[in-house]
Image (spheres, rainbow, N blue to C red):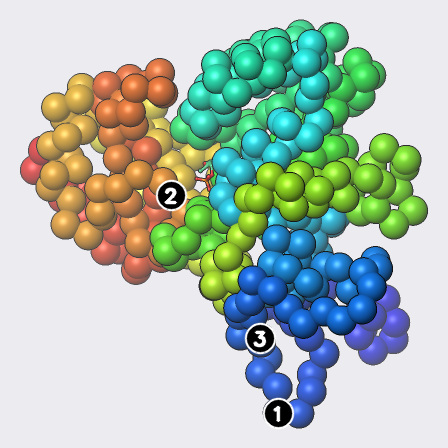
Amino acid sequence: MTENGHDRVQAPGTRVVHGGLPAPADGEPILPGPVFGSLFHLAGDIDATNASSSYHRLGNPTWTRYEEALAELEGGDVVLFSSGMAAVTAVLTTFLKTGDVLVAPADGYHGLRGLAGGLLARMGIEVRLVPSTDADVLAAVSGAALVWIETPTNPGLGQLDVARIAEAAHAAGALLAVDSTLATPLRLRPLEHGADLVVVSASKHLTGHSDLVLGYVAAPAAAGGAEGAAGRAAELVTTRLLGGAIAGPMEAWLAHRSLPTLEVRLERQEATAATLVAALRERDDVSDVRYPGFGSVLVFTLADAAAARGFLARCRLVAEATSFGGVHSTAERRGRWPADAVAPGFVRFSVGIEATEDVVLDVLAALDAA
Ligand SMILES: *Cc1c(COP(=O)(O)O)cnc(C)c1O
């Protein structure tokens, strides 16, 4: 830090506001609008400097600004994709080959398990599904090419020790990928704990307004990195270029537009979640209340499916909807989806940014009436 403090590293709550913005220039907006264009003017021969601004699938300045903002938050290079699952698929298809072993969560986001039986089976990849505990994952890493963990897990909210698993994965010659969607880079930066790849669905907290679908992968920064690490983001850029899972400029711009409020949204969501968790733990009709201590998602279990349906039907403010991380409080009976093995009365609750007392009162009134 210098005397006047101006050179200190800015706090994440400041970086979300300023990340990826161009240098101030008179007459220019603070965040330039989305650049729409499938093609761009390009004269003469192709070289490294002009190729990425020739055709949208190779690059778009609106993505680049958002990627730069995310890169600052994650502490690595970031490659933006059209959805979280596009980011997941890019990692799997770029870093696994026939005969490899993938260790993956048995109790995490269902999309990855869906790929295990389909795409990955056809690629000839052996998938070891393991429960999300440190002991189970550590016991499974031997012989793996890629260890995939999710922390906290969706929907069970289990938490794993990224540093310990990274060390074990590396000792076994495997890469570690962490799905960090629930935490966001404001609450967990897996690259700092030794992860090789970080996958985030930006459709959730990152964008936070339930109006778009995006995802990204972060990898250790290329500059001066170890040989293996240097190429990882670049390999993902090639996968995106040829696989075609690119973000639209409008989505990327909306995402960047939503980023500055990430910390204030999270702080409100976390304050309300803490109050709600305390109120739910007081009740006899609610069991197994779980909350990681950060983020917007908490889960609890009601007596049975009918009790959960009755609760959701009686909420007036809280909308019955899937997904999480948005400004509006939502909840669902997770067991209505066949892919998650949860109790019939298991409710996944996503706390919005409404006034705390209104959310808590709506939940308690709906429980009383149910
Ligand atoms: C939603 C989600 C995904 C998939 O992201 P999409 O943007 O819906 O494709 C992946 N992992 C986790 C943990 C998620 O919650």
Quarter of the rendering occupied by the C terminus? top left
Given contact means CB atoms under 8 Å apart, are the residues at marks 1 and 2 in contact? no
CA gap, disc 1 to disc 3? 12 Å
Q: Residue furthest front?
A: 44
Q: Amino acid at mark 2?
A: Phe
Q: Secondary structure at mark 3?
A: loop
Q: Position of residue 166 (x, y in %)?
A: 74, 25
Q: Position of residue 300 (x, y in %)?
A: 31, 29
- The answer to whether residue 30 is visible is yes
Q: Is residue 243 above or below residue 161?
A: below
Q: Secondary structure at mark 1?
A: loop
| Residue labelled with disc 3 | 31
| Residue labelled with disc 1 | 27
Q: Residue at x 61, y 34 (%)?
A: 90
Q: Residue at x 61, y 11 (%)?
A: 124
Beta carbon of the mark 2 residue lies under 8 A of ligand 1: yes
CA gap, disc 1 to disc 2? 38 Å
Q: Which mark is residue 324?
A: 2
Q: Amino acid at mark 1?
A: Gly
Lateral position of residue 209 relative to residue 245, left or right:
left
Q: Earlier in the sequence, mark 1 or mark 2?
A: 1
**Of 37 and 267, the residue lying toward us:** 37
Q: Position of residue 195 (x, y in %)?
A: 72, 32
Q: Amino acid at mark 3?
A: Leu
Q: Residue at x 56, y 49 (%)?
A: 246
Q: Is residue 44 above or below residue 55?
A: below
Crowd class of label 2 (few under 14; some 14 to 19; many from 20; radius 10 Å): many
Residue 48 sits in quarter: bottom right
Q: Secondary structure at mark 2?
A: loop
